[in-house]
Image (cartoon, rainbow, N blue to C red):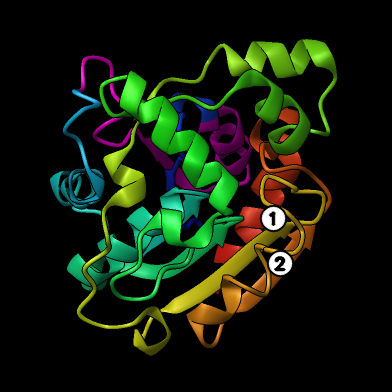
Amino acid sequence: MSDTYVLVHGAWHTGAELEPVAEHMRKAGHLVHCVTLAGNRPGDDRSTSGLSDATASVVDFMAKRDLKDVRLVGHSYGGMVISGVADLAPRRIRRLVYWNAFVPLRGECLNDMVPSNYVALFDSVAKANHNAVMLPEMIWREAFINDADAALAARAYRKLNPQPYRTFTDKIALTTELAAMPVGKSYVNFTEDCAMPHSLTWHPRLSEKLGLFRLVQGPGSHEVCFTNPALLAQKLIEAGRD
């Protein structure tokens, strides 16, 4: 059976980085779109783009293509975005899939859910870079893509782009808490993901905010889209299927 997926990238990424994953999913018979969020497109003003702009860009993407029964996947920061999309366009969505992603309560921002040392780092970088932040390469190598060799980690890092800091500091406006939304929800957790300290776990600390949800797990880092796209595709299909 062919299902429709929209893949929403995390911070510092574009939809292009998810195309290898999408190709594996397409070979399995599914229709897969990789969107690049407002704020991460070439030429976007990183000093002014915020969470609502990114969210609206996904709503517009689905509306222009009249996509329905969508399995909407969000990675990391993309969890903030798909949560907002679910609130604005619920009739287009069949299931929400959070892949090592942030799950907000109403009125939370991404920075409310990350360690204080990350917030201090991001504040400092944004202040010096017109309100844009870039992930330092050492943090990327050790915490985000720890299952890659040095060459792959370096190649992947060169694909990243500055992130509008407002997407981390804007508080999400939800009319309904995610746990109360009548839509299917899944959480995909890669067990070697140490982008956040294991004392601030992705699952169950964030996943439990979804209320009733399906859990799918596998081995890999936060950036398994680079290190094992075939496995990621398999897990997203497991998470998205009826």
Q: Residue at x 54, y 27 (%)?
A: 135
Q: Nearer the viewer, residue 188 or 192?
A: 192
Left or right: 64 as drawn, with respect to 94: left
Neighbor class of circle 2 (other Cα within 10 Å; few <14, some 14-19, many 20+) is some
Left or right: 177 as drawn, with respect to 199: left
Where in the figure is residue 57, as x and y percent of width and height? 20, 43
Q: Which residues are magenta?
A: 18-44
Give the quadrant of residue 87. bottom left
Where in the figure is residue 216, as x and y percent of width and height? 71, 66
Residue 28 belongs to magenta span: yes
- On the question of residue 14 being in view, the answer is no
Q: Which mark is residue 235?
A: 1
Q: Residue at x 70, y 60 (%)?
A: 189
Left or right: 124 as drawn, with respect to 156: left
Q: Nearer the viewer, residue 146 or 69?
A: 146
Q: Which mark is residue 85?
A: none
Name the residue type under label 1. Answer: Lys
Left or right: 57 as drawn, with respect to 215: left
Give me the C-alpha separation between circle 1 and circle 2.
7 Å
* Tally of marks: 2
Q: Is residue 16 above or below residue 110?
A: above
Q: Which mark is residue 216?
A: 2
Verify CB contact (< 8 Å) between mark 1 and mark 2: yes
Where in the figure is residue 142, as x and y percent of width and height? 77, 31
Give the quadrant of residue 41. top left
Q: Is residue 13 above or below residue 105?
A: above
Residue 49 belongs to magenta span: no
Q: Residue at x 38, y 70 (%)?
A: 94
Where in the figure is residue 84, as x and y percent of width and height? 28, 63
- On the question of residue 142 being in view, the answer is yes
